[in-house]
Image (cartoon, rainbow, N blue to C red):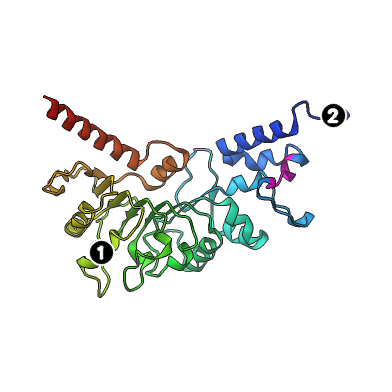
Amino acid sequence: MPETDPKLPPELERSIFEIAACSRPVTIPTLMLVAQRVHAWYFQALNIVMAAHDVLYRVEPLLYRVICVSDTPPIDDGFPHFTMDILANALKEKPASFFKNAVHHVFVGFTGELFHPMFFPQIRSFLGACTGITTLYIADIYMAPTSLLRHLSPMPLRHLTVKPSALFAESLHFRDPAFRFVTHLHLLGNLAMGGGGMYIWDHFSGNKPEEWKKGLTTIPHLTHFAFNSPNSRELVYPALHACPRLKCCILFCSPGVDGTAWLPESRDVRFIVSSLPEAQLDWQYRVIGGEDMWARAEAVIAGRRAGQMRAEKS
């Protein structure tokens, strides 16, 4: 059968493929095989002028928009599951500008069975290339104490979940550019993923509670904060009570534990306790616009405020 021109305008056809790719990124490799023109649509909006063999394609980068690197079974939600080998090969084959423009949401987490020390430099190299990340979740309990700030500083981060020891080698640096756009911060502490372990705050030599209080209040756009250790509430609550921008503070407890006694005596409606959600699933809800831990907390706070208003009127 002779090849015929598409019946739809090229601009509309391209928009349809982009919507399909964003809705279910795992289908992107198949979409790229539909026609040569699909594979060749490049970033016209970015005005990238490159040689033919270096063209950044329009659809392929959508495959890397959301990246989950984990040794747990992939969640069947339409997002591709990446391994460190896949990312290492991609870093070699593609220009740095590809990852800068393509990658926006990243989850990194290993339970330990498939973890290898070589992952440390690979993760750092990967983060160093992805300077456009806005949502980052590093849930790896085996991440060696190291400073990732120099890799995070160029990113326009809004949502950050990480162990403090993965950021700060010796002292706290909440004034670092890495936090300049952060609105949602979740400090994990020593979290045993999937093991129901103890949630212990990371302590560093030379750090005092006053440093944490001073540090948290210097994050310019912080509106949402979460932490995992009840023992840390005495240094977190005083700092965040004085933060007028704060909309929500969550203390996560072990499943089945009633943590209401750990709420501040002021009964500030912004402070709640909750069971720790499944990390990867909750992160993906956040990425696709579903009800994540922050949305659930905001619903609780809205209910409290409504109750206060009813009580004042009665």
Determine whether, in the image, residue 103 is placed left or right of residue 142.
Answer: right
Residue designated by label 1: 214
Front residue (pair 37, 25):
37
* Residue at (13, 30) in percent of width and height: 312
What amino acid is at disc 1? Lys
* Residue at (17, 44) in percent of width and height: 268
Front residue (pair 221, 26):
221
Image quadrant where one finds the C terminus: top left
Residue 92 pos. (x, y %): 64, 63
In the image, residue 268 above or below residue 166: above
**Magenta-highlighted residues:** 38-44
Front residue (pair 172, 227):
172
SS at badge 1: helix
* Residue at (34, 66) in percent of width and height: 165
In the image, residue 100 above or below residue 166: above
Q: Does label 2 or label 1 sit earlier along the sequence?
A: 2
Determine whether, in the image, residue 19 is placed left or right of residue 35.
Answer: left
Check residue 42 for magenta coloring: yes
In the image, residue 286 above or below residue 145: above
Residue designated by label 2: 4
Determine whether, in the image, residue 167 is placed left or right of residue 297.
Answer: right
